[in-house]
Amino acid sequence: MNVAVVGYSGPVDRPPVCEIAQVCVELGTELAKNGYTIVCGGRDGVMELVSLGARRVNGTVIGVLPREEEGNPHLTVKIRTPFDNVTRSLVLIETSDVVVSVGGEVGTAIEVLVAYAKGKPIILFVGTGGWTDRFAEVLIEGRFLDSRRNVAVHKARTVREILQLLEAMRR
């Protein structure tokens, strides 16, 4: 199963990324240990930390890169696109089976909305800030982003909860 992890970009040693660094590395490690292939935007921030965690346990990380980006050093596979950050997100979401959102700014919001529009299951890692927490606050019936009720949006507060949700989706 391809699990997209979307979230904050930016230097890993500066807020807001540094504030969730440990849990991002743990997320990457546990996804890889449980046999999931990670798909991400391949850059810095959450993407780099999740990639680092996965590679520490020989996991597979696919980075879908915007044009003229080299990607972080922990990627297993680099898919270089001719697109900007926003357009490359369409490829990222299309390549995934489920999306895990961690914090994030407008790029993350776009990725979550595209996933929802395409009917991809979404897990919001609540407590990581940004658009992830904003989405969690406005869900219709606690599960949907709009009245069409395309696909359930799940909330998780720990890496363990994320893994439990993913395992249930695998079945």
Image (cartoon, helix red, strand yellow):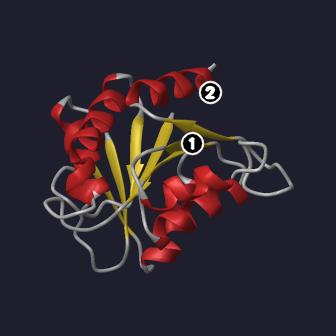
Q: Which residue is mark 1?
A: 98
At label 1, counting other C-alpha atoms closer than 10 Å, the crowd grade (few under 14, some 14-19, many 20 or more) is many
Q: Is residue 68 left or right of residue 89?
A: left
143 sits left or right of 171 in the view: right
**Amino acid at dot 2:** Met
Of all residues, the one furthest to the front in this rendering is 137
Residue for badge 2: 169
Residue visible at 28% across and 45% down in the picture: 50
117 to 70, vertically: above or below: above
Quarter of image, res 138: bottom right
Residue furthest toward the right?
A: 148
Location of the C terminus by quadrant is: top right
Residue 56, horizontal then vertical, whole percent? 16, 34
> Quarter-wise, where is residue 130 in the image?
bottom left
Q: Residue at x 50, y 54 (%)?
A: 132
Measured from the top left, where is residue 156 in percent x and y? 51, 35
Amino acid tagged 1:
Val
> How far apart in space, not on screen, are marks 1 and 2 (Cα)?
9 Å
- Please state which of residues 149 and 20 is positioned toward the viewer in this rendering: 20
